[in-house]
Image (cartoon, rainbow, N blue to C red):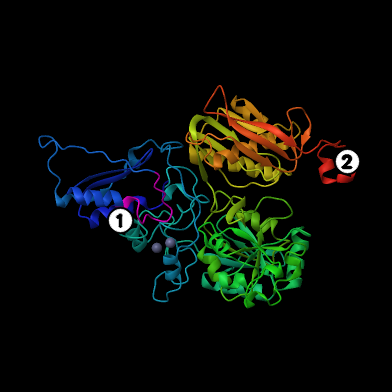
Amino acid sequence: MQGVGFRPFVWRLATRLGLVGSVENIATGVAIEVAGPREDVRALVEGLSGATPPLAVVTAVTVEDSPTDPQQDPPATEAQGFVILDRRATAPRGVGAVSGILVPPDVAACPACLAEVGDPADRRHRYPFTNCTDCGPRYSIIERLPYDRGTTTMRGFAMCDRCDEEYRDPASRRFHAQPNACPDCGPTCSFLPSGPAGFDDVAPCTGADAIAAAREALLRGAIVAVKGIGGYRLACDATDAEAVERLRVRKGRPSKPLAVLVADVAAVRRLARCDEQERLALESAERPIVLLSRDPARFAGAETSRASPIADAVAAATATLGVMLPDAPLHHLLCEGLPPLVMTSGNVADDPIVHDDAAALDRLAGVADAVLRHDRPIHAPCDDSVVRCMAGVAVPLRRSRGAVPLVVPLGNTGPDVLAIGGDLKAAPCVTRGALAICGAHVGDLGSVATLGSLERAVDHLLCLTGARPLAVAVDLHPGWISTAWARRWAAARGVPIVAVQHHEAHVASLVAEQGGVSHDQDGPWIAVCFDGTGFGHDGTIRGGEIFVVERDAVDPAAFQPRRIAALEACAMPGGDAAAREPWRA
Ligand SMILES: [Zn+2]
Ligand SMILES: [Zn+2]
């Protein structure tokens, strides 16, 4: 992946060992060439799988001896040192120029950056856009490859001398950190209160004053639209029943539970049960919403025995509460010392999350009392990711901010194929070579606006992967909006669509996720799929189904799911309408 700080990591390692040579990105990973005493070279190789940067994943290290020819290769001298080669400048520009190399997801602020934000002596003290090679926005700000400041939404901010120095220094934590910024040169935030004619865009207060004003407004019971990493979110005091009720009415969300943001795990434990697994999920780099149990019988310890301070209207009818910790420094600064804050997607009803500044002022005008925004544009919107810990495993319910792009190795190489899922909880995925790359959650395809964001999510995914799909996989259901969209998309590009039965698609993705397609695992597996409804090959709607998955007899690289049991069929008058209105059946 690009932008994970791996080359500087190698540089530091090699320089410390006094080795001579170079490191560079190549299509399949990173190539390192070194010369030096054998034991030092061995130490370097061992170090490569050691304390790597948090975002880097080393899947394999291959070592080759390259004997030097004294006639042709003059002996390396100490003075040459170890260098980071950057040949991207000479490589062809544009999509796919660095095939095989992907960009990482957006990453929550790292402890080193947060320490700087909290240090009055640091030049980034209380700076809400502090980031480094280990953290900060990525997926949401990259417009195209190769990943460079000029191809991100940071290109409008020219680095000051001190930031530029960090950016060029391989020993710095900010070497080639594309979103690198400081109060002198980076983005700023501003606070816009609501006036008689919409939000007051004329003289907003900026910088630290903006965050202070937003905090004050929240404490007064206001609904504040806060621009985050992946889009605008609506915030209010979660302990203020009247504010929560007002938010629900204005947003047109009468009953679905809302998530809350708190500063740290201690604050989480005052609201809900949080075991070790759940703590790890909350504090992971993707900072998802984690669904936690509020069942008093399951609370352990005195700290959770008090009545919950959260207003009933936040998550009235459920025994769970969605909780998240701050991701960007902006949110750390916003929520420290405040009561728990409701944080929900900045949208009305089921529309996609608002990420564009002009659209936010327009569409959130009737919803929010004020706006806390910043001037770093969001290119690829992402909603919050959602996970739930079950039986000791953090199970993703929605993969989005921080969790995309997700790369799943398939074991086999195949043609590029685009898949967009069904009508509900749609999310695009594309295969490229032996990888499946999943994009951000789009949502339910019920409106023109969500179809627009599906289009956008597909474009972004294809741009980041350089994939050129030879087919589009869709659900077998002939009446779905996703199928109609895919038909149009495929026709415009002259590629076929491939219809896949809903539950068989789930089974295939499960097998891939479990590493089942690698050749060392033969199966068979039992796959249990209870997922609402899926249109069947025989034209019936399927409820729950159980499959046996075995290697294909003809093509050993393929797997075939065979249905062995299913819920009994019943009449569904009105088709899908009967699922929403069971009295019909
Ligand atoms: Zn950092
Ligand atoms: Zn700067």
Residue at figure coordinates x 86%, y 46% from the top left: 581
Q: Tell me the amino acid under the disc marked 1.
A: Pro
Is any part of residue 264 visible from this angle?
A: no
Q: Is residue 56 magenta?
A: yes
Question: Where, quadrant-wise, is the C terminus in this rendering?
Answer: top right
x and y percentages locating residue 60 in the rendered image: 37, 43
Q: Which mark is residue 170?
A: 1
Q: Is residue 546 magenta?
A: no
x and y percentages locating residue 372 in the rendered image: 60, 65
**Relative vertical location of residue 333 with respect to residue 33 in this rendering, above or below:** below
Q: Which residues are magenta?
A: 47-59
- Structural crowding at the residue carrying mark 1, measured as other residues with C-alpha within 10 Å and reported as few (<14), some (14–19) or many (≥20): many
Q: Which mark is residue 585?
A: 2
Ligand 1 image-quadrant field = bottom left
Q: Tell me the amino acid under the disc marked 2.
A: Ala
Q: Earlier in the sequence, mark 2 or mark 1?
A: 1
Near-viewer residue (232 or 506) = 506
Near-viewer residue (47 or 92) = 47
Q: Quadrant of residue 563?
A: top right
